[in-house]
Image: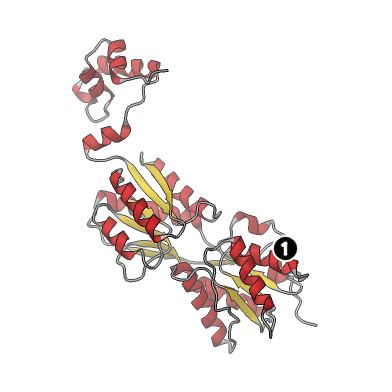
């Protein structure tokens, strides 16, 4: 079936195509007699006409679109963040284009170039990492950029983040309160603010208690289940002290670590307690349910969307940075540890 055109609508309504165009344009409808507007819109609805929103937007100087850049669409923590952004945009008549970088600098540059070419009015980047500063600042000369979840210290780019340093401290305090003395962490990818800050907060809190965290020299290449399993297997293969508790830098890595423990006949929490991070939906339903640090993804996305809209309306607004407080969510993966016998 051929696509319905503006000329088809004009012919059905018995008007010139330019009159139909003005009648269908919310900003120009007042230039056309009300009876004609009603007739043209009825014809458009009857024929199922869909205007070219991007072309129309470009003529008016805006496209009503916003970009969302994520690191990994397969990571379940990102869904509520994107939903928070999307729901807030919809109420303002804005649509989002979503792209994935897979934590690759080259892909980040290509994604930003593609979004700029499509004339998006702002971009929310949830997947920034060290080394992306130059391409983000270059993109910032063409459109407002807002960082969400991860930030780039010293970049001057506004960011809505989670207090991950405090989240790491909360995880350490929880394990200390339950009597653990041999405590390890499985580190997420280096060069990403959220994982770097979780590591330092956890490490520093243990040091104030007179303990040194057990760590590998290695870190995850990506914050995935497979990498959590790989790092846990390496941790268990080390000679020397076996930890009684593990802090994995996100829930997916914690799931992988549980697989590695089970593969070597160790149980959680009886042998090794486990804490994850993000409070993704599955953490409450694994065996055992996993203690985690909650990241308020929906609220974070909503606030990032708010910031982007403000900058779209006034690019000269002060560049604000906000950090949301963490909450520890205790579950059986740590509460079920009874200490050593």
Q: Quadrant of the N terminus?
A: top left
Q: Residue at x 22, y 27 (%)?
A: 28
- Please say whether residue 292 is visible from this viewpoint: no
Most foreground residue, 267 or 308: 267
Residue 147, how many percent across, how many down?
Answer: 38, 59
Residue at 35%, 16% (x, y): give it.
Answer: 42
Pick the residue in front: 129 or 64: 129
* Residue 37 visible in the snapshot: yes
> On the image, which quarter does residue 242 sit in?
bottom right
Give the answer, above or below, for where 266 lies relative to 282. below
Relative placement, left or right, of 220 versus 232 is left
Give how far across and how far down residue 40 sits, in percent: 30, 16
Q: Local crowd at mark 1 within 10 Å, few (<14), some, or many (≥20)?
A: some
Residue wearing tag 1: 288
Q: Position of residue 32 (x, y in %)?
A: 21, 20
Q: Going by the image, does 197 lie left or right of 146?
A: right
- Secondary structure of the residue carrying numbered label 1: loop
Tell me if 30 is positioned left or right of 268 in this view.
left
Report which quarter residue 341 is drawn in.
Answer: bottom right
Q: Is residue 152 above or below residue 3?
A: below
């Amino acid at each position: 079936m051929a696509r319905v055109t503006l000329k088809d609508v004009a012919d059905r309504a018995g008007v010139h195509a330019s009159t139909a165009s003005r009648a269908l344009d919310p900003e120009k409808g007042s230039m056309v007699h009300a009876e004609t507007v009603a007739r043209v819109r009825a014809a458009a609805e009857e024929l199922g006409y869909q205007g070219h929103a991007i072309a129309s937007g470009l003529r008016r100087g805006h496209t009503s679109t916003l970009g969302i850049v994520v690191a990994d669409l397969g990571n379940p923590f990102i869904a509520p963040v994107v939903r928070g952004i999307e729901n807030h945009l919809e109420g303002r008549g804005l649509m989002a284009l979503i792209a994935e970088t897979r934590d690759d600098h080259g892909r980040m540059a290509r994604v930003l170039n593609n979004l700029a070419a499509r004339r998006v009015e702002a971009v929310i980047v949830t997947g920034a990492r060290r080394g992306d500063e130059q391409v983000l600042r270059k993109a910032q000369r063409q459109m407002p950029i807002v960082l969400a979840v991860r930030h780039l210290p010293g970049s001057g780019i506004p960011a809505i983040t989670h207090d991950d340093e405090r989240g790491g401290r909360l995880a350490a305090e929880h394990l200390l309160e339950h009597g653990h003395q041999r405590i390890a962490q499985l580190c997420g990818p280096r060069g990403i603010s959220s994982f770097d800050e979780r590591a330092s907060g956890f490490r520093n809190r243990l040091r104030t208690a007179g303990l040194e965290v057990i760590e590998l020299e290695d870190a995850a290449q990506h914050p995935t289940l497979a990498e959590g399993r790989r790092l846990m297997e390496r941790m268990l293969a080390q000679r020397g002290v076996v930890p009684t508790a593990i802090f994995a830098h996100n829930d997916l890595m914690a799931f992988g670590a549980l697989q590695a423990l089970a593969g070597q006949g160790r149980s959680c929490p009886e042998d090794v307690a486990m804490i994850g991070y993000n409070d993704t939906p599955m953490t409450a339903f694994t065996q055992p349910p996993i203690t985690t640090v909650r990241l308020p993804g929906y609220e974070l996305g909503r606030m990032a969307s708010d910031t982007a809209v403000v900058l779209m309306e006034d690019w000269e607004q002060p560049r604000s940075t906000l950090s949301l407080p963490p909450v520890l969510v205790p579950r059986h993966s740590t509460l079920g540890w009874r200490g050593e016998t």
